[in-house]
Image: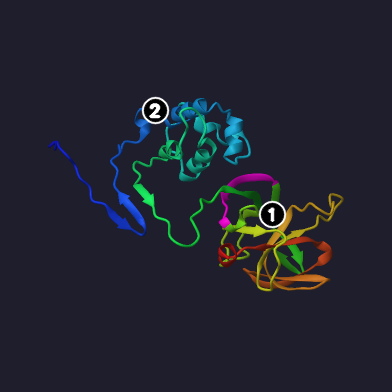
């Protein structure tokens, strides 16, 4: 192996408003000396935080969601999603202060640019927060409407299964949430497992995709809680009924407003960027 000694020069390259200078860094993933779990335990002790505090700051439901990563024998690199959440929890804490990169490096990122952002006229970039709640869903029993079997979803708003990046325009909006579409009734618009973002109270328009909350048909109906929902397209609504469409099979049907608790709008890309 040849070793070259002396001064090494790099060229400065101006790319899309960023003065970029390549920075040498060790390409060896840091778990070659420590496991990922050992590195996280060290950060936890450095920050003087409990697992419960870390989980809360990372927007997890509880410490059981993160404790696996804090075992000394945990060796795998963190996923990018987990690394970002934990970086959010640790950043700025401890002595010496823990940086974003201290945690992100545990995702196996081996190098980063030494870059200086250049301010342009217009809106500045904002880091999206990982705090948009995703509610647990499951495929529910079909409900018969006008003689047709209509697919519905069981939704558990008391179970937050994770968090997603919150679009900047939803910062401070408490009534926005995410969920996974269950079943194939909206295929090809939404295939089974598709992720959608909905917002309560947003004005409805004909042609919107909506999450319709159905009243329980028993003594558990308290006028506020619904576990069964439908993700469908809004065709028409009146004081007496709401008319909806699903695509597989292609069916249009009506639900009495007496059975509807509320209807939330599924946000489009245009909504999220406006």
Circle 1 residue: 175
From the top left corner, tell me how far across and down residue 201 is, in percent: 72, 61
Residue 89 located within the stretch drawn in magenta: no
3D distance between C-alphas at marks 1 and 2: 42 Å
Q: Is residue 108 above or below residue 260?
A: above
| Label of residue 189 in the image | none
User: Is 51 on the left or on the right of 124, as rendered?
Assistant: right
**Part of the protein shown in magenta:** 158-168
From the top left corner, tell me how far across and down residue 13 is, in percent: 28, 55
Q: Quadrant of residue 77?
A: top left
How many marks are shown on the rendered structure?
2
Viewer can see residue 144:
yes
Residue at the spot 70% in from the left edge and 63% down from the top edge: 202
Circle 2 residue: 34
Viewer-proximal residue among 122 and 264: 122
User: Is 16 on the left or on the right of 66, as rendered?
Assistant: left
From the top left corner, tell me how far across and down residue 190 is, in percent: 58, 63
Q: Is residue 241 above or below residue 180?
A: below
Mark 1 or 2, nearer chain start: 2
User: Is 218 on the left or on the right of 184, as rendered?
Assistant: right
């Amino acid at each position: 192996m040849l070793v070259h000694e002396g001064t090494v020069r790099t060229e400065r390259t101006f790319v899309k408003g960023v003065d970029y200078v390549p920075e040498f860094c060790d390409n060896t993933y840091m778990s070659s000396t420590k496991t990922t779990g050992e590195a996280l335990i060290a950060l936890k002790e450095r920050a003087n935080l409990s697992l419960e505090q870390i989980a809360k700051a990372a927007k997890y439901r509880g410490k059981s969601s993160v404790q696996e990563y804090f075992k000394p024998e945990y060796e795998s690199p963190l996923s990018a999603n987990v690394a970002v959440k934990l970086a959010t929890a640790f950043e700025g804490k401890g002595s010496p202060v823990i940086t974003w990169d201290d945690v992100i490096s545990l995702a196996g990122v081996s190098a980063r640019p030494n870059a200086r952002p250049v301010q342009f006229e217009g809106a500045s970039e904002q880091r999206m927060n990982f705090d948009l709640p995703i509610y647990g869903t499951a495929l529910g029993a079909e409900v018969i409407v006008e003689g047709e079997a209509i697919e519905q979803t069981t939704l558990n708003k008391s179970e937050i299964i994770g968090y997603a990046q919150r679009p900047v325009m939803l910062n401070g909006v408490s009534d926005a949430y995410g969920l996974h579409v269950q079943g194939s009734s909206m295929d090809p618009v939404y295939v089974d497992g598709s992720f959608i973002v909905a917002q309560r109270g947003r004005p409805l328009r004909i042609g919107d995709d909506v999450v319709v909350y159905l009243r329980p048909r028993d003594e558990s109906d308290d006028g506020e809680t619904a576990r069964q929902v439908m993700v469908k397209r809004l065709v028409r609504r009146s004081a007496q009924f709401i008319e909806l469409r699903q695509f597989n099979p292609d069916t249009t049907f009506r639900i009495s407003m007496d059975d509807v608790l509320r209807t939330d709008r599924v946000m489009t890309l245009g909504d999220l960027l406006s």
